[in-house]
Image (cartoon, rainbow, N blue to C red):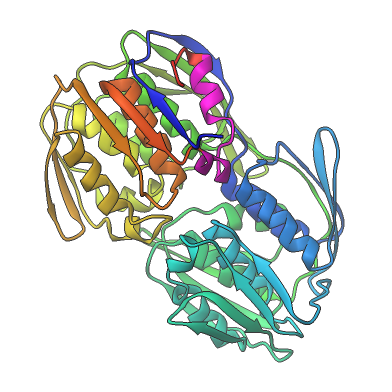
Amino acid sequence: MKNYIQIKNTIKSFNKKIEVSGDKSISIRCVLLASQALGKTKLYNLLESEDVINSLDSIKKLGIKVKKYKDFYEIHGFGINGYNTKKKLTINAGNSGTLARLILGLLVDSKNEIKLVGDKSLSKRDFSRVTDPLKLFGANIISNKNNLPLKIIGSEYLRPINYDEVLGSAQCKSSVMLASLKTPGKTIIKAKKSRNHTELIFKFLKIPIKIKEKKKYDNIEIKGPVNFTGFNYKIPGDISSSAFFIVLTLLSINSKIKISNVNVNNSRTGILKILNKMNANIKLKNRRIYKGEELADIIVKSRSNLKGIDCPKILNSYAIDEFLVIFLVAAKAKGISKFKGLSELNKKESPRLEVAVNFLKKIGVKYLRNGDNLKIYGNPELVLKDNYLIKDFRKDHRVFMMSCVAALSFGGKWKIEDKDSIKTSFPTFIRLLKYLGAEIN
């Protein structure tokens, strides 16, 4: 079967309602926490992507029972000491940095050596950002230049740590938080602002956590060890997946979309704040709280008078997975858009800042890059007519989806390779595009 798609026409006007798949970040966190709970957990609307399936496979290898029903997954955990870490065990995280980094936090007390591997892309990503603090807990971790594969042997004499998380990485913060569940005493984390899904789930599970919010960072205290019981959870829609449809609607002609039941947690809505500063027309309706997370329906209308932005750096960590499509809006906006401090983009599945710059060059958009700062000179009259081939992007699912949005918005004839990459996070992406009227071969 051919692993590419072709797009030859822009999308026609549409007015549709959709729901996107379950939030990937929350899905993985719920799977891992369910594996440490006492008793049965039921997870509804769990994202059935490769990253989440790899998470389920990983906990099964650790002796946790997983059963799929029609409407939910049931996970039977045996508490924080319930993993069966057999000898010569290998866990494959596939493409998922979230799974790889978070599960390491749960293996700090493993009695036997466990090998953690990933695909070619994940194996090039830096793991020192989590292995360094986990070693302070007492875990013994052996790696090759801080990359996968690595080996971890836990300690039965874990000690709490004081940890400064300075990158704004929710994965690093969460890995330390999960390790603290198994550690006697008080672990203290000074964390630069980032996604707070783990904190909210801890609160929902009544895990003893104290959070003092400051302007630029949070002070988090967790007292362990902690046991907690199984739980029921319905995973909300993923705003990172919604982002592609938000931008497609903005850049299309006379179009409107309603995306229902989306997680609009304040630490994830950077894209909405950035786009509304660019004169977008994005509204949240039916806002409500579910187990600490805020949900809403997102209403988006086309916008022809988008404007450039001097993007506040503080929003970077709140939109880290959405910048690729934000750059598409900047390319079509009037004026210059300025983005600063984008180094974390190159720590993702592919070096996304590099990819973005090459993509802008390919489609003829003027830009100026200085280190991890980027200026995009927008062109409201941008229309593409050439042939475009997108390949060699390390099978990064978000690069593939961004390319589809560009093709459907700007015109031209496109061949976009590695369509199977969307299985990582959003298997129904192409189906939803076709539902909106996109012609995709």
Estimate the x, y position of residue 163 in percent, counting from the top left. 48, 78
Q: Classify 424 as above or below 76.
A: above
Which residue is found at the position 26% from the left and 53% from the top? 354
Dominant secondary structure (helix, strand or loop) of the stretch shown in magenta:
helix
* Residue reaching furthest to the bottom: 157
The magenta segment is 420-435
Q: In which image quadrant can residue 146 be found?
A: bottom left
Res 14 quadrant in image:
top left
Q: What x and y, as percent, mark residue 337?
A: 16, 39
Residue appearing at x 45%, y 74% in the figure: 129
Q: Where does the image place residue 374, in percent across and percent down from the top left? A: 17, 49
Residue nearest the observer in this picture, 431 or 226: 431
**Residue at (65%, 77%) from the top-left corner?**
115
Q: Residue at x 30, y 32 (%)?
A: 275
Q: Is residue 282 visible?
A: yes
The image quarter containing residue 71 is top right
Q: Would residue 423 be counted in the magenta stretch?
A: yes
